[in-house]
């Protein structure tokens, strides 16, 4: 039986990943410090779905991570634990660094020292590319788009860490790739773009698709930072988990490589377009507020998925409208989970 260790495994992506791998017959161990709102509910849900082992621990605790990795010696380590908001990183850059940069270093060292055969996947971010000032952006049909990159941003785009969050995740990204070069670890970085789906307790600072959907269902006002014309390629969490699975099946193809993982050009949506869709789908009015652009916010980010298609045999299967409808239905059916917003 194959085994997988998932840090941040009680988070949104973590429980979806754990449930999927357990359903495929993998032995699953979840590590989480349960510090984020919603993780305890997610963990209870996960434990009702599948037999998983759980370790309450913090990735900043190097000794604990070494102990766990040495005991489990997983076939795959999926590193999802992170500080996830740009705004939080600006307020507390030291904590952001400790979690994202030092925490990832701790996990890589635990694998290097105690389980070097493990295939290591780290969840990086499109924020490692910064604001991409060198890439021309135009406005077309009420939304921003790249002037020339019709297939989106490839992994050849120069890195330009912007904001403490971009720096800490960029450090984690580069350490992951360098451990493949220097130590021969089988490790890869997924530069993820706007993941959304069920079990996501999105907040205003992070997880905008989920936050807009939750706020719309509950009748809460939504703040638009900037002008709302900025677009992202959005990816349903089930498609993301399929990408993890594809990489785990082809570790030699993935090792030492970074992959842009998002919805791609076929699954883009602006903030205003999402609001219009939710308004039509839910048949409600959505109260809006407006504020300035936030640090590090890109007017456009769309992944070029060619490398993931060619090396991993992966591409998204769930369309953006289908995925958002699924999320809205889940929120509507589980409003008790959002009592803290009432």
Image (cartoon, rainbow, N blue to C red):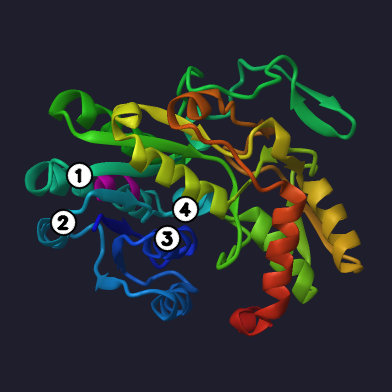
Instruction: Tell which tag, 1 or 4, sits nearer the viewer.
Output: 1
Labels 2 and 4 touching (C-beta < 8 A): no
Q: Position of residue 78 (x, y in %)?
A: 33, 50
Q: Which residue is mark 3?
A: 14
Left or right: residue 304 versus residue 60 is right
3D distance between C-alphas at marks 2 and 3: 17 Å
Q: Which residue is mark 4?
A: 84
Q: Is residue 289 above or below residue 149?
A: below
**Pointer 2 or 4: first along the chain:** 2
**Pointer 1 or 3: first along the chain:** 3
Q: Which residue is mark 2?
A: 69
Left or right: residue 108 versus residue 121 is left
**Pointer 2 or 3: first along the chain:** 3
Instruction: Tell which tag, 1 or 3, sits nearer the viewer.
Output: 1
Q: Secondary structure at mark 1?
A: loop
Q: Where is the C terminus found, in terms of image quarters?
A: bottom right
**Front residue of this view, candidates 257 and 245:** 245
3D distance between C-alphas at marks 1 and 3: 18 Å
**Pointer 1 or 2: first along the chain:** 2
Q: Secondary structure at mark 3?
A: helix
**Front residue of this view, candidates 280 and 119:** 119
The stretch drawn in magenta includes residue 281: no
Mark 4, Cα crowd under 10 Å, few <14 / some 14-19 / many 20+, is some
**Pointer 1 or 4: first along the chain:** 4
Q: Which residue is mark 1?
A: 118
Mark 3, Cα crowd under 10 Å, few <14 / some 14-19 / many 20+, is many
3D distance between C-alphas at marks 2 and 4: 23 Å
């Amino acid at each position: 039986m194959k085994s997988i260790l998932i840090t941040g495994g009680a988070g949104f992506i973590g429980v979806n990943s754990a449930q999927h791998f357990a359903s495929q017959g993998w032995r699953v161990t979840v590590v989480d410090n349960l510090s984020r709102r919603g993780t305890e509910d997610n963990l209870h849900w996960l434990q009702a779905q599948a037999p998983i082992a759980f370790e309450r621990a913090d990735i900043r605790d190097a000794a604990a991570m070494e102990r766990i990795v040495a005991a489990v010696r997983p076939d795959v380590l999926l590193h999802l634990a992170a500080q996830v908001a740009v705004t939080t990183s600006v307020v507390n850059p030291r904590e952001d660094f400790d979690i994202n940069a030092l925490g990832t270093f701790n996990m890589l060292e635990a694998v290097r020292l105690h389980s070097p055969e493990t295939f290591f996947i780290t969840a990086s971010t499109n924020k490692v590319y910064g604001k991409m000032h060198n890439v021309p952006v135009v406005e077309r049909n009420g939304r921003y788009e790249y002037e020339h990159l019709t297939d989106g941003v490839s992994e050849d785009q120069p890195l330009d860490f912007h904001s403490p969050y971009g720096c800490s995740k960029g450090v984690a990204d580069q350490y992951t790739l360098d451990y493949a070069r220097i130590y021969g670890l089988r490790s890869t970085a997924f530069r993820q773009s706007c993941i959304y789906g069920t079990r996501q307790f999105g907040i205003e600072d992070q997880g905008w698709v989920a936050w807009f959907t939750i706020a719309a269902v509950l009748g809460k006002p939504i703040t638009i930072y900037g002008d709302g014309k900025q677009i992202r390629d959005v990816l349903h969490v089930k498609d993301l988990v399929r990408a993890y699975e594809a990489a785990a099946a082809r570790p030699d193809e993935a090792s030492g490589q970074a992959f842009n993982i998002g919805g791609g050009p076929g699954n883009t949506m602006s903030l205003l377009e999402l609001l219009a869709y939710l308004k039509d789908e839910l048949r409600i009015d959505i109260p809006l507020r407006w504020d300035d652009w936030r640090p590090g916010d890109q007017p456009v980010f769309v992944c070029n998925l060619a490398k993931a298609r060619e090396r991993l045999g992966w591409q998204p299967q769930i369309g953006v409208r289908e995925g958002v409808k699924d999320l809205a239905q889940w929120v509507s059916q589980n409003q008790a989970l959002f009592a803290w917003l009432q």
